[in-house]
């Protein structure tokens, strides 16, 4: 291990054998954390070549079992976000796609740092079981059309250990490590198609479009090497998505989306991601797929799929039919504008951090999340405000949690006297174009 660390420290390229030796040894507990940390930091500082990143991905996949979904008829698709604030669209995307006839096998994670996690959101629904057996997962996908579960311990265990170590050694935000981590899990899932939502901006791991595009291209290239159909969208995370950040609040927003009542940005992203999944699955031209998604919402079919999925996971569907049944937080506080003008910038990561401070996320891995805690967003970048107008409402179960969260959120806002230009939501599309059912004119970016 000493030689492997030294080679990477000096900028050398590790062989497949060396990467395999490291991943296997670390997963089995034969390589100590201090040596693994040193190698991760060397990789962070020197970077990994494509061959090294691909080898790391393969070793992460090999570290556990892979799911066999071949017994389920039809194409199986999934979607993954690199992480953001208020980004609960997976909850709407899975049932929309299932309602259009493509099976969705989704394995999701918990909140990481300032970013929210789909599992924490689903667990805000009374009774929802995120840990179905593989057999039950397959049954729900086959019967309902979609299922969202947590990653099983058997799948990509190397990533679990490596991610926990990266989290405490400041080695998370490196594109090669992120790509291997995400794809190591996603490619072990037995899916045919994957749509990646690569978040860009102050609330994302990738702060610039250039970094995000490089991550997207890398993930698309690796997934293609593994024979998967894949598209990556670069989407804006300089402002929180939708109007809610917090677990129950985001389930409610997803239900609103499935009932055609969600904020415009949320609906646009949910529709686009869903349409891209249908498109990769060969359901038609992109515009036809977008239309199918809209119809699935209008007809109520997507909402019914969500309800069926919740029921199949043991969740209380009365809460889905009547979202006022979600327990609300005991306390709330309005954060107000400091001056007249326009909101010119939001540090969206600070919104995520404020959510964590309110109890919607975890400070330490073992912490429990408060499903009712979170932020309702009233104003966003570009909106005009008068001093004293409400910008956001904070929700928490203890009044003592508000001061720090309010300070964090207020400090993240900048004001100007002129209206700033709003950035588009979907910034770019990176895709692999070698599939026979794609016609050349259909592969262009949707901007
Ligand atoms: N999400 C992951 O699963 N892994 C990373 O490294 C970053 C985000």
Image (spheres, rainbow, N blue to C red):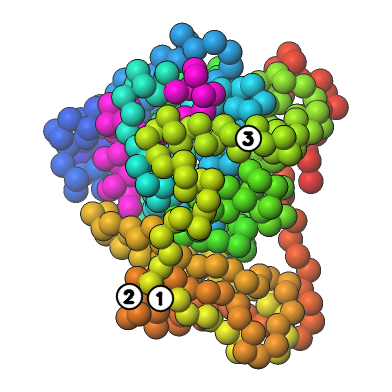
Query: For the magenta stretch, what is the residue range?
Result: 140-168
Q: Secondary structure at mark 2?
A: loop
Q: Which residue is mark 3?
A: 302
Residue annotated with mark 2: 398
Q: Is residue 143 magenta?
A: yes
Does dot 3 land on a helix, a strand or a loop?
A: helix
**Residues at badges 3 and 1 in contact (C-beta under 8 Å)?**
no
Residue at 42% across / 29% down in the picture? 312
Q: Is residue 427 left or right of residue 113?
A: right
Above or below, comparing residue 221 to residue 85 in the picture: above
Circles 2 and 1, Cβ within 8 Å, touching? The answer is yes
Give the side of residue 229 with respect to residue 121, left or right: right
At horizontal 58% and vertical 41% (from top left) the residue drawn is 92
Q: In the displayed structure, would residue 398 be above or below residue 286?
A: below
Closer to the camera, 309 or 52?
309
Q: Earlier in the sequence, mark 2 or mark 1?
A: 1
The x and y percentages for residue 421 are: 78, 68
- Label 1: which residue? 331
The location of residue 123, given as percent across then percent down, is: 38, 46
Residue 205 at x, y percent in the picture: 50, 54
């Amino acid at each position: 291990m000493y030689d492997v660390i030294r080679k990477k420290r000096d900028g050398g390229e590790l062989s497949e054998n060396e990467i395999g030796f490291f991943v296997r040894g670390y997963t089995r507990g034969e390589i100590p954390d201090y040596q693994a940390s040193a190698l991760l930091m060397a990789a962070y500082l020197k970077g990994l070549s494509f061959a090294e990143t691909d080898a790391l991905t393969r070793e992460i996949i090999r570290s556990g079992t892979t799911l066999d979904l071949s017994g389920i008829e039809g194409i199986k698709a999934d979607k993954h976000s690199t992480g953001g604030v208020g980004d609960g669209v997976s909850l709407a995307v899975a049932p929309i796609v299932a309602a259009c006839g493509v099976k969705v096998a989704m394995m999701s994670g918990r909140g990481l740092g300032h970013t929210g996690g789909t599992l924490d959101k689903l667990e805000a629904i009374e009774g929802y079981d995120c840990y179905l057996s593989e057999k039950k997962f397959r049954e729900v996908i086959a019967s309902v059309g979609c299922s969202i579960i947590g990653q099983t311990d058997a799948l990509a265990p190397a990533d679990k250990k490596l991610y926990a170590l990266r989290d405490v050694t400041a080695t998370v935000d490196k594109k090669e490590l992120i790509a291997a981590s995400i794809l190591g899990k996603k490619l072990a899932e037995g899916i045919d198609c994957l749509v990646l939502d690569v978040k860009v901006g102050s609330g994302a791991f990738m702060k610039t479009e250039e970094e995000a595009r490089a991550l997207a291209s890398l993930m698309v290239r690796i997934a293609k090497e593994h024979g998967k159909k894949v598209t990556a969208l670069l989407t804006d995370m300089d402002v929180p998505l939708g109007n809610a950040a917090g677990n129950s609040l985001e389930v409610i927003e997803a239900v609103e989306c499935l009932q055609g009542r969600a904020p415009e940005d949320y609906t646009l992203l949910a529709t686009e991601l869903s349409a891209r999944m249908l498109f990769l699955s060969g359901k038609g031209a992109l515009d036809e797929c977008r239309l199918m998604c809209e119809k699935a919402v209008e007809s109520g079919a997507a909402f019914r799929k969500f309800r069926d999925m919740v029921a199949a996971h043991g969740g209380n569907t009365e809460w889905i039919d009547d979202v006022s049944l979600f327990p609300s937080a005991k306390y709330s506080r309005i954060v107000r504008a400091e001056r007249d003008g326009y909101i010119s910038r939001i540090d969206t990561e600070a919104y995520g951090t404020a959510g964590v401070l309110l109890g919607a996320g975890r400070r330490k891995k073992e912490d429990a999340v408060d499903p009712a805690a979170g932020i309702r967003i009233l104003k966003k970048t570009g909106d005009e405000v008068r001093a004293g107008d409400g910008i956001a409402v904070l929700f928490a179960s203890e009044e003592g949690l508000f001061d720090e969260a309010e300070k964090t959120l207020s400090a993240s806002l900048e004001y100007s006297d002129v209206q700033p230009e709003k950035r588009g939501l979907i910034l770019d599309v990176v895709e692999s174009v070698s599939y026979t059912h794609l016609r050349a004119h259909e592969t262009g970016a949707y901007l």
